[in-house]
């Protein structure tokens, strides 16, 4: 998470200051238009409704599908396949997916290795605003107000029932000049120390390249919207950076997952530019090829890749009434998982400009974004199931959550907990993994579940919702007004 305006990593600092500024009038207009489109059943797929290469042809599906699956086995499969350089393309659909709360189980044959493995990560938690934090393009784990990460905190997270920790990492100025692009060894040492805290305590860890792909971050360089001539340098640097990371961790087993990048896009909220999307696809291919060649246990490591801005519509290609020109291309590899984010509705989950919508649920009458609660969760998660889970690819919702609005109304915590529980329930029903976004801040507009200084729980209701939802066999009861 980096961006406080849309679906990416909201609440970058404790004060909620925004790294990418969008005029309030424009945001209000977008919100009004979004509401109109939801009410009329229209989705233009241009506003990240769900956050969410070489040209390849995609088949078009027209069937309306009602699906779901039982929970996959939690043991990781042992079969390995060496990565190939050929690619496959996600099919584009022009039909609205019919959502159900109790989808039918998928045939056993559709459960791929990465789907089975991914269940080990469920539920997960983000160590946000720490190793991706930076000041003027220089990463520092305390520069955004959080304390130094301690093993005591990691143990507290595990004690609450979380199975994995996503560790966002920025490199930025810690990368030296080309052609070697050497990463500061002390920074990699610190990343490794935090990874070890997680794995040594029986947790799975996910590390990525996080803030380097933002136009809004000083020193950002992994920029898909730059010219073709610039892309040659960007790709060479990207390969060198992942080569160093992969070699540093080459002896780590399946408890460490690599995620290629974070919310990669061109800095606008328009429909994806095909040329720029091809650059993202190329980055993912470079990532897979580089990790597989790095030796040790990297040949069998599970890898996590995002599509455009980790947006569900733009990643699945299912934009309801809009047909995408750009396509998400998945490298042909048996141990690939897909990364998306879910901050919908944004007015409830992350908008800090106003606190009008502090409740969540289709049955709620006031202070709620209509038709953007349980029904939308099911519709969007069905898209993920149909595009990926059913075809053997694990799916990780690497970020989701909602900010604290109890200063507006004390009942907000109840609705935040219900949101978290329902998202986890709906994900669990489809073998999708969730990783809650925690930025370490507790208070107005904070995402924090823990006090990182005292290493204590601050939001027991929300944590209970996450843990219960992640194993639930029936939908949780909605709060009553």
Image: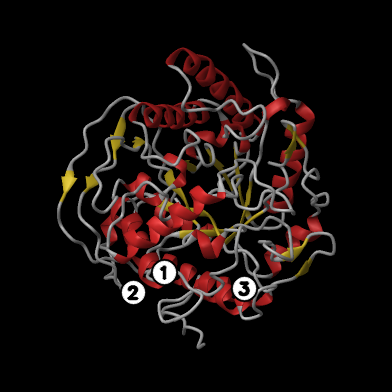
Number of numbered markers: 3
Q: In this figure, which residue is indicated by the disc labeled 1?
A: 426
**Residue 6 can be seen, yes or no:** no
| Labels 3 and 2: the sequence-earlier one | 2
Report the coloring of the rendering: secondary structure
Give the percent coordinates (x, y) of residue 336: 42, 43
Callout 2–callout 1 Cβ contact below 8 Å: yes
Q: In this figure, which residue is indicated by the disc labeled 2?
A: 101
Q: What element does badge 1 sit on?
A: helix
| Residue 462, disc | 3
Q: What element does badge 3 sit on?
A: helix
**Mark 3 and mark 2: Cα distance apart in space:** 21 Å
**Mark 3 and mark 1: Cα distance apart in space:** 16 Å
Picture layout, residue 430 above or below residue 268: below
Nearest to the observer: residue 129 or residue 266: 266
| Residue at the spot 37% in from the left edge and 70% down from the top edge | 371
Nearest to the observer: residue 446 or residue 24: 24
458 left or right of 109 in image: right
The quarter of the displayed image where residue 426 is located: bottom left
């Amino acid at each position: 998470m980096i961006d406080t305006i849309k679906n990416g990593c909201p609440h970058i600092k404790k004060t909620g200051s925004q790294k990418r500024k969008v005029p309030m009038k424009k945001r209000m207009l977008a919100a009004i238009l979004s509401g109109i489109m939801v009410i009329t059943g229209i989705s233009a797929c241009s506003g990240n409704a769900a956050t969410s290469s070489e040209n390849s042809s995609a088949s078009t599906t027209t069937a309306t599908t009602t699906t779901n699956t039982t929970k996959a086995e939690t043991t990781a499969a042992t079969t390995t396949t060496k990565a190939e350089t050929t690619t496959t393309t996600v099919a584009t659909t022009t039909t609205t997916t019919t959502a159900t709360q109790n989808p039918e189980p998928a045939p056993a044959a559709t459960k791929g290795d990465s789907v089975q493995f991914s269940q080990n990560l469920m539920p997960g938690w983000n160590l946000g605003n720490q190793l991706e934090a930076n000041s003027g393009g220089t990463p520092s784990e305390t520069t955004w107000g959080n304390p130094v990460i301690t093993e005591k905190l990691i143990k507290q997270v595990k004690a609450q029932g979380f199975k994995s920790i996503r560790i966002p990492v920025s490199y930025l100025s810690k990368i030296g000049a080309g052609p070697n692009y050497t990463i500061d060894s002390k920074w990699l040492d610190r990343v490794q120390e935090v990874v070890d805290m997680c794995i040594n305590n029986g947790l799975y860890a996910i590390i990525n390249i996080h803030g380097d792909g933002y136009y809004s971050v000083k020193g950002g360089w992994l920029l898909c919207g730059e010219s073709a001539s610039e892309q040659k340098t960007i790709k060479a640097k990207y390969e060198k950076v992942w080569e160093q990371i992969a070699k540093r961790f080459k002896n780590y087993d399946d408890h460490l997952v690599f995620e290629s990048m974070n919310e990669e896009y061109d800095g606008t909220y328009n429909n994806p530019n095909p040329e720029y999307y091809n650059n993202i696809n190329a980055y993912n291919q470079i990532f897979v090829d580089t990790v597989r060649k790095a030796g040790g246990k990297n040949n069998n490591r599970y890898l996590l890749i995002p599509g455009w801005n980790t947006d569900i519509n733009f990643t699945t290609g299912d934009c309801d009434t809009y047909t995408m020109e750009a396509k998400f291309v998945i490298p042909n590899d048996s141990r690939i998982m897909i990364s998306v984010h879910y901050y919908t509705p944004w007015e409830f989950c992350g908008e800090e400009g106003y606190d009008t919508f502090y409740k969540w649920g289709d049955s709620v009458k006031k202070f709620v974004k209509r038709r953007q609660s349980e029904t939308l969760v099911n519709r969007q998660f069905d898209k993920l199931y149909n595009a990926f889970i059913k075809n053997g690819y694990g799916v990780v919702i690497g970020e989701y959550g909602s900010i604290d609005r109890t200063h507006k109304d004390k009942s907000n915590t109840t609705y935040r907990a219900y949101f978290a529980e329902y998202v986890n329930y709906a994900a669990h029903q489809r073998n999708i993994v969730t990783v809650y976004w925690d930025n370490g801040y507790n208070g107005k507009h904070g995402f924090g579940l823990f006090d990182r200084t005292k290493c204590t729980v601050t939001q027991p209701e929300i944590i209970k919702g996450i843990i219960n939802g992640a194993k639930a066999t029936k939908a949780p009861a909605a709060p009553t007004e």
